[in-house]
């Protein structure tokens, strides 16, 4: 598997197809890794399109990755790390591959990675697809802090050199924020790139967050019914059409 060397670790990634690039951020929270796109051999089937296959078929280059400290990627965890740390990895990967401009498409935590990428380098991101975006659930504000505590146990079990206070500081930077955690409503209201939204409906992906994104994002396209086998064709076709419409002319 190809590897991007970072100053504090390594990021594993794969590319599929040829054409204008789409950087994919897989579902899975802090465990976001490229194997989350295809359905596992033993099932059950994913309720979403496998973009590592659908995008190359449509003429794009799909860039999939294991986020730092997920899947095969291993890197440092510091108390001052946060969303900006992931964004730096993402920009470094596209630099490494020679892609100056690209689309972003993210599921679950990937929606927040997309928005942070736009904030970090708006001149490089052609458009953003937010699939099932995470957010602070008004009735379950403890969800992500609790999930971070479980992730912390996993990390410390695998890497005894890690310190609990460092992991707690990192968790604060990631989750002690409202809305979508990585950017605020003011940024979303003036988002400078075209967006497409596949709304969420459950605790980690609140309907309220998606409704607010739909209300704030300027000119956003929304596909309400997108989950499950009956909607995969429409999900694929609408997203591909959106990406093609917003691909810069060469």
Image (cartoon, rainbow, N blue to C red):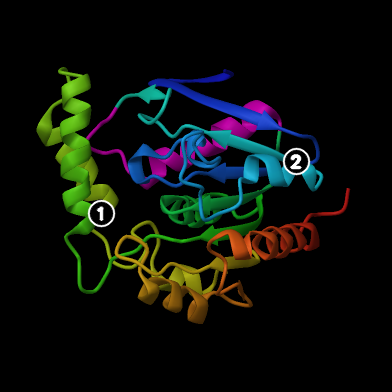
Residue, far right: 250
Q: Which mark is residue 56?
A: 2
Q: Which mark is residue 175?
A: 1
- The answer to whether 14 is drawn above or below residue 50 in the figure is above
> Based on the displayed image, in which of its 4 quarters is residue 63 positioned?
top right
Residue 233, image x, y percentages: 69, 60
Closer to the camera, 145 or 192? 145
Q: Is residue 106 visible?
A: yes
Residue 110, image x, y percentages: 47, 50
Q: Residue at x 34, y 63 (%)?
A: 135
What is the span of residues highlighted in magenta in the rendered image? 77-98
Decide if residue 41 is on the left or right side of residue 71.
Answer: right
Our reading of the magenta stretch's main secondary structure is helix
Decide if residue 143 is on the left or right side of residue 245.
Answer: left
**Disc 2 to disc 1, how far (Cα)?**
34 Å
Decide if residue 92 is on the left or right side of residue 238.
Answer: left
83 within the magenta span:
yes
Q: Residue at x 81, y 44 (%)?
A: 59
- The answer to whether 140 is drawn above or below residue 48 in the figure is below
């Amino acid at each position: 598997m190809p590897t991007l060397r970072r100053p504090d670790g390594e990021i594993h990634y794969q590319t599929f197809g040829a054409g204008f690039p789409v950087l994919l951020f897989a579902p899975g929270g802090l465990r976001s890794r490229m194997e989350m796109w295809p359905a596992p051999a033993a099932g059950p089937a994913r309720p979403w399109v496998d973009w590592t296959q659908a995008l190359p078929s449509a003429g794009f280059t799909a860039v999939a990755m294991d986020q730092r400290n997920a899947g095969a990627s291993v890197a440092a965890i510091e108390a001052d790390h946060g969303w900006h740390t992931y964004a730096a990895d993402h920009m470094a990967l596209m630099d490494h591959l020679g892609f100056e401009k690209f689309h972003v498409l993210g599921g679950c935590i990937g929606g927040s990675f997309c928005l942070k990428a736009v904030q970090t380098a708006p001149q490089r991101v052609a458009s953003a697809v937010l699939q099932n975006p995470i957010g602070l659930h008004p009735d379950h504000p403890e969800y992500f802090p609790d999930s971070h505590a479980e992730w912390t146990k996993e990390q410390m079990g695998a890497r005894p050199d890690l310190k609990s206070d460092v992991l707690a500081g990192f968790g604060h930077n990631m989750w002690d924020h409202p809305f979508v955690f990585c950017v605020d409503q003011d940024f979303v209201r003036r988002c400078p790139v075209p967006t497409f939204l596949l709304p969420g409906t459950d605790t980690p992906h609140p309907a309220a967050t998606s409704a607010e994104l739909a209300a704030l994002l300027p000119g956003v396209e929304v596909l309400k019914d997108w989950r499950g086998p009956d909607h995969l064709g429409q999900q694929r076709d609408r997203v591909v059409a959106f990406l093609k419409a917003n691909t810069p002319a060469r």
